[in-house]
Image (cartoon, rainbow, N blue to C red):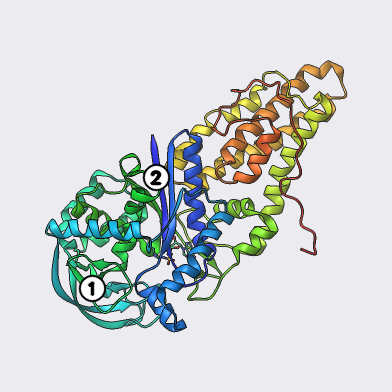
């Protein structure tokens, strides 16, 4: 089994922010989870360096657009590393390997008869690099996403016959109901298709910064086709000396609602036109909001992920984002909310559970997990839990899956209180029961921690090591028998000093 997951590639027109990190973390959780299930995984992220959004910023700063890519691509790469993203490759659309392959595919679409020369006039947003249909325009002439004035543009350029894929797309949506998830996003995309599709421009004449149209080098390929193709081109050169296309294509895409239309409509149609298999699926998430606004560079409302990671660690941030905001919906985030969950859930619930379990096994059983059978009242709560989490993760329901896993953390804490091992330890007649309780706690903690591993790779890695767990595959409760020597564990989520 193989699994190929992607993030959007981010524009290099400004510093990366938490919104970008969010998509990257989401894709990373899926990548890690599928690796834990023994699948071959390829995880791709990267930067989108051509087109209007980047050219505009370059003009404003009076620099060559290439310079922006060289400045910001390393920052995006660094942010991915800091949030513990386990991407297998980082694509830049300025890579030679990408450019060459984009031209190949676009040429194929042309050869297949899906391209013609024409003129387009309409309302254009340079930040979106997109013409807006009448129904998308806000307040007469504003971009609904960037809140800036749209400009009236006329262009003579090459067109992609999107309209001729109307039926194919409708059929695709019918045959593959989960092609776009969640459902309400699928319905949104389908409604857009059913309105009637118009052809879209495939090239830009005024623009110099982009991939030259192979049969008309005076024009560059429209940035959206160049960008979408990254998902496909990367497999051709992302691992040196190998073509991974056969092994990993088609991809599963993670993205937010702002770029739904490109992914859910243009992209599959373009692939069909090129004779390439359409994506395996895509999950469309919402926006992280601070004080009710979409967090973005242009609105200037940015929470600094670097600071959060420096103070609390990447795992805490990863956990918070997927716990606080129901994945798929827009959701408010705040530094106060983050700190509160760090304290109450990560430190008090999970961190304490880990430390208590290890220290009790240490104190009462010399650090060796007893070989025993867990009490049914505990074991019962774990039945089917891993399976439920897997099902939810298969549907990219990252928040619901985490919710299920967190129930196990809470169940274990409740069990510690109920079973009160410190009382059992005082009574020799209860030695067997104490064995059973300690075994159950260690086993429950192990199984739960394996499930949490995709969300919080670093802290869970440390805990699993202390639990003497060599592998990272998901496990059923009771599948390990006891007898392990437990190690030392520094607090997983230390309390912050006020000075911090
Ligand atoms: N370059 C295009 C994407 C091309 S993909 C073939 C682009 N880039 S972007 O830099 O604007 O990134 C947009 C994506 O970043 C969103 O779709 C989303 O995945 C992520 N986010 C940016 N801000 C976000 C929030 N405030 N909240 C959640 N995700 C956000 O569009």
Residue linked to disc 2: 4
Q: Where residue 482 appears, x then y in whole percent?
A: 68, 21
Q: Let me know if residue 144 appears in the view.
A: no
Q: Is residue 454 above or below residue 169?
A: above
Q: In this rendering, would 258 be left or right of 278?
A: right
- Disc 1 residue lies near ligand 1 with CB under 8 A: no
Task: Identify the secondary structure beneath mark 1.
Answer: strand
Question: Which one is nearer the viewer's eye here, 427 or 6?
Answer: 6
Q: Is residue 102 above or below residue 252?
A: below
Instruction: Say which mark, if any, is on residue 410.
Output: none
Task: Identify the secondary structure beneath mark 2.
Answer: strand
Point out the quarter of the image occupied by ligand 1. bottom left
Q: In this rendering, would 279 be left or right of 5?
A: left
Question: Which one is nearer the viewer's eye here, 174 or 36?
Answer: 36
Residue drawn 45% across and 73% down? Answer: 67
Q: Is residue 121 above or below residue 261?
A: below
Q: How crowded is the residue under tag 1: few (<14 C-alpha within 10 Å), some, or many (20+)?
A: many
Q: How crowded is the residue under tag 2: few (<14 C-alpha within 10 Å), some, or many (20+)?
A: many
Most distant residue in the right direction: 426
Q: In this rendering, would 69 be left or right of 464?
A: left
Q: Where residue 278 appears, x then y in whole percent?
A: 27, 49
Residue linked to disc 1: 219
The answer to which image quadrant residue 94 occupies is bottom left
Question: Which one is nearer the viewer's eye here, 211 or 192?
Answer: 211
């Amino acid at each position: 089994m193989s699994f190929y997951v992607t993030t959007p590639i981010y524009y290099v027109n400004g510093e990366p922010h938490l919104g970008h990190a969010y998509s990257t973390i989401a894709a990373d959780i899926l990548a890690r989870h599928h690796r834990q299930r023994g699948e071959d995984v390829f995880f791709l992220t990267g930067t989108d360096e051509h087109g209007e959004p980047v050219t505009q910023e370059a003009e404003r700063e009076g620099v060559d657009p290439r310079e922006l890519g060289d400045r910001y691509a390393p920052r995006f790469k660094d942010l991915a590393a800091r949030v513990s993203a386990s991407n297998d490759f980082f694509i830049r659309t300025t890579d030679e390997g990408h450019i060459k392959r984009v031209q190949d595919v676009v040429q194929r679409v042309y050869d297949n008869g899906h391209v013609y020369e024409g003129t387009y006039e309409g309302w254009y947003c340079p930040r979106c690099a997109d013409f807006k249909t009448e129904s998308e325009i806000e307040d007469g002439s504003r971009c609904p996403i960037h809140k800036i004035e749209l400009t009236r543009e006329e262009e003579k350029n090459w067109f992609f016959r999107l309209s001729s894929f109307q039926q194919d797309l409708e059929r695709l949506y019918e045959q593959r109901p989960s092609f776009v998830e969640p459902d309400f996003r699928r319905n949104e995309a389908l409604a857009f298709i059913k309105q009637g599709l118009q052809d879209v421009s495939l090239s830009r004449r005024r623009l110099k910064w982009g991939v030259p149209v192979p049969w008309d080098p005076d024009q560059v390929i429209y940035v959206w086709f160049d960008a979408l193709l990254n998902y496909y081109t990367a497999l051709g050169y992302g691992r040196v000396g190998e073509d991974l296309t056969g092994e990993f294509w088609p991809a599963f895409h993670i993205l937010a609602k702002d770029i739904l239309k490109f992914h859910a409509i243009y992209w599959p149609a373009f692939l069909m036109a090129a004779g390439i298999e359409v994506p395996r699926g895509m999950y469309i998430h919402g926006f992280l909001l601070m004080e009710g606004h979409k967090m973005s560079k242009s609105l200037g409302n940015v929470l600094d992920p670097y600071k959060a990671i420096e103070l609390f660690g990447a795992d805490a941030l990863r956990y918070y984002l997927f716990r606080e905001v129901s994945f798929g919906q827009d959701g408010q985030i705040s530094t106060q909310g983050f700190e509160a969950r760090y304290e109450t859930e990560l430190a008090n619930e999970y961190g304490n559970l880990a430390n208590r379990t290890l220290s009790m096994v240490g104190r009462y059983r010399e650090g060796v997990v007893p070989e025993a059978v867990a009490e049914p009242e505990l074991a019962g709560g774990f039945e089917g839990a891993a399976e439920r989490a897997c099902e939810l993760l298969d549907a990219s329901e990252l928040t619901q899956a985490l919710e299920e896993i967190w129930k196990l953390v809470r169940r274990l804490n409740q069990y510690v209180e109920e079973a009160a091992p410190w009382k059992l330890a005082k009574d020799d007649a209860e030695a067997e029961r104490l064995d059973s309780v300690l075994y159950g706690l260690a086993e429950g903690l192990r199984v739960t921690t394996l499930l949490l591993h995709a969300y919080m790779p670093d802290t869970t890695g440390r805990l699993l090591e202390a639990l003497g767990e060599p592998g990272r595959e998901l496990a059923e409760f009771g599948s390990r028998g006891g007898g392990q020597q437990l190690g030392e564990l520094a607090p997983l989520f230390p309390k912050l000093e006020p000075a911090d």
